[in-house]
């Protein structure tokens, strides 16, 4: 593997420069204004795959944004790795809170990234992490050291729920046949503490509408006599948690996996500095479900959060109005064994039951996704563990991530393949926030680690 290290050293700057170019493309999947940019990003991704020697590279059109696919089959007897990632990014808003423009990448040092970090939307989530796979592949091909068959499937709709990837996978089961799915779209604990993600939360995303009077009213003439939908909505939302911060939706916890005290102990042994955590977030205290630590609250417990709430007058100055309608977007993060469809129904029933007769409520569902638990006794896990240990000089800790990648559960069901969640970001990299960044250390460490995975996976599969 010495030749690979030499190759990486010799090409570091070029790898970085190439990534910076990709970060200039505003491939925001949620915003129709950027549809052309999303396609440009698909094309640029395809060009990079071709340039490093991936065969049969194609841009597969879907009902939404395209999927970039390509493969390199080196040996029918060797195992096949399907690399999954996404080239789309979250909207950059609010842009005024960025220290530098979101699509004009700059490298700056930070306290957690003393070697420097790339600041741009998508730097960590997920362009930087996808690009590590492209460059690791380049190194292996150029050094004649690619021990596995590789398939790349890079999508453009992860940030909007992977709506069309599901169908693509079902329609292309043969083409996508593989032994393992390799994904870098998660975090490590810190530079000195490598970790592998062994759980992802599921998601159930709802929107609610509360309607009162058939038009906006004068809040003096009618106020006090007619239900105010915003007041009512706030009360309904407030009742969704009890004093111990449990979610009150009936049946919400019925299927939640009970994690053994042994595993809980292990989770809580991971390094975590609560004071620093609060300081970084600018909060004087934390808040969450009673009886669970922060690591448990984000790793093994389901949650309910309001993502947005609106209605009435929000313009400049004051307008005295009793609004006709109020709205909120409410999401629930789910954990192992919770069924997003079932939770959707439970939430709808519960929320409707909360409404007083003076208002009407409408509950609709947005995207959802199943939670994921990754076994740690599989060949793929052992190979990724060994790869990280080799690169970091330390065995990685298994860690449950709080975020969601809804499509991972589908890989298991449709492609019958387990996923390795070997991400290299930090939770503090501000993904989805202003000033998203990705450490140069993390970028290069990822490129170094990936070929070890291929090596150990091929060896372990042979046995
Ligand atoms: N890469 C993230 C998910 C993630 C981040 C998992 C950090 C674990 C640690 C992914 O791009 C993401 O943002 N997912 C969305 C899913 C949604 C848009 C359907 C999420 O978690 O909100
Ligand atoms: Mn991502
Ligand atoms: Mn994301």
Image: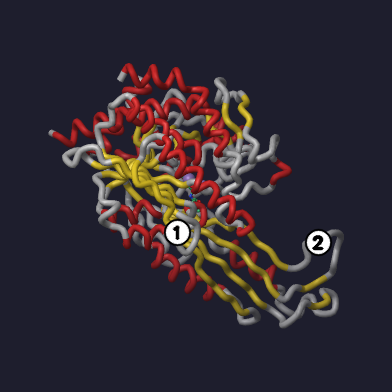
- How would you rate the neighbour count of disc 2 (Cα within 10 Å): few for under 14, some for 14-19, many for 20 or more? few
> Residue at the spot x=27%, y=37% of the render?
381
Using the image, tell me which numbered label, if any, was put on residue 438: none
State whether residue 109 appears in this view.
Answer: yes
State whether residue 199 appears in this view.
Answer: no
Which colour scheme appears in the figure? secondary structure
Residue 30 image-quadrant placement = bottom right
Q: Position of residue 85 (x, y in %)?
A: 42, 45
> Residue at the spot x=61%, y=40% of the render?
24
- 61 in relation to 359, above or below: above
Quadrant location, the N terminus:
top left
- How would you rate the neighbour count of disc 1 (Cα within 10 Å): few for under 14, some for 14-19, many for 20 or more? few
> Residue at the spot x=69%, y=47% of the render?
94
Quadrant location, the C terminus:
top left
3D distance between C-alphas at marks 1 and 2: 41 Å
- 310 in relation to 383, above or below: below
Q: Where is residue 301 in the image (x, y as percent from the top left)?
A: 42, 50
Q: Which of 233 and 161 is in front in this view?
A: 161
Q: Which of marks 1 and 2 is nearer the N terminus?
A: 1
Q: Which of 126 and 244 is in front in this view?
A: 126
The residue to which callout 2 is attached is 315
Mark 1 element type = loop
Q: Which of marks 1 and 2 is in front?
A: 1
């Amino acid at each position: 593997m010495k030749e690979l290290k030499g190759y990486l050293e010799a090409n570091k700057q070029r790898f970085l420069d190439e990534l910076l170019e990709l970060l200039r493309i505003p491939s925001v999947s949620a915003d129709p204004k950027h549809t052309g940019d999303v396609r440009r990003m698909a094309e640029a991704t395809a060009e990079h795959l071709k340039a490093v020697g991936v065969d049969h590279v194609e841009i597969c059109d879907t009902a939404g944004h395209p999927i970039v696919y390509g493969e390199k089959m080196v040996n029918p007897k060797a195992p096949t790795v399907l690399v999954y990632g996404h080239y789309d990014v979250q909207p950059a808003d609010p842009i005024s809170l960025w220290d530098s423009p979101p699509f004009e990448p700059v490298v700056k040092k930070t306290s957690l990234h003393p070697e420097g970090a790339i600041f741009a939307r998508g730097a960590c989530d997920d362009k930087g992490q996808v690009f590590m796979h492209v460059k690791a592949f380049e190194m292996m091909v150029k050094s004649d050291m690619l021990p596995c068959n590789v398939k790349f499937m890079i999508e453009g709709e992860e940030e909007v729920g992977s709506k069309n990837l599901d169908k693509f996978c079902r329609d292309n089961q043969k083409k996508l046949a593989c032994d393992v799915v390799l994904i870098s779209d998660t975090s490590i604990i810190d530079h000195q503490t490598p970790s592998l993600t062994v759980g992802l939360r599921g998601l159930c995303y709802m929107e609610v509408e509360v309607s009162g009077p058939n038009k906006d009213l004068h809040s003096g003439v009618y106020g006090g006599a007619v239900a105010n939908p915003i007041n009512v909505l706030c009360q309904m939302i407030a009742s969704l948690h009890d004093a111990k911060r449990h979610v009150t939706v009936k049946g919400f916890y019925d299927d939640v996996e009970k994690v053994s005290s042994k595993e809980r102990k292990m989770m809580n042994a991971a390094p975590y500095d609560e004071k620093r955590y609060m300081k970084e977030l600018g909060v004087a205290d934390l808040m969450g479900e009673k009886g669970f630590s922060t690591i448990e609250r984000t790793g093994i417990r389901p949650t309910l959060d309001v993502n947005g709430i609106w209605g009435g007058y929000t313009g400049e100055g004051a307008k005295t109005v009793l609004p006709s309608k109020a709205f909120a977007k409410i999401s629930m993060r789910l954990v192992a064994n919770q069924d997003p469809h079932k939770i959707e129904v439970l939430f709808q029933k519960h929320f409707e039951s909360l409404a007083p007769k003076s208002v009407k409520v409408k509950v609709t569902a947005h995207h959802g996704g199943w939670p994921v638990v990754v076994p740690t006794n599989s060949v793929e896990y052992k190979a990724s563990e060994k790869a990280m240990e080799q690169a970091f000089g330390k065995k990685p800790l298994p860690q449950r991530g709080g975020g969601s990648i809804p499509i991972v559960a589908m890989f298991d069901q449709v492609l019958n393949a387990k996923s390795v969640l070997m991400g290299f970001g930090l939770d503090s990299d501000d993904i989805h926030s202003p000033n998203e960044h990705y450490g140069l250390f993390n970028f290069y460490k990822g490129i170094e680690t990936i070929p070890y995975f291929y090596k150990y996976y091929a060896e372990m599969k042979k046995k």
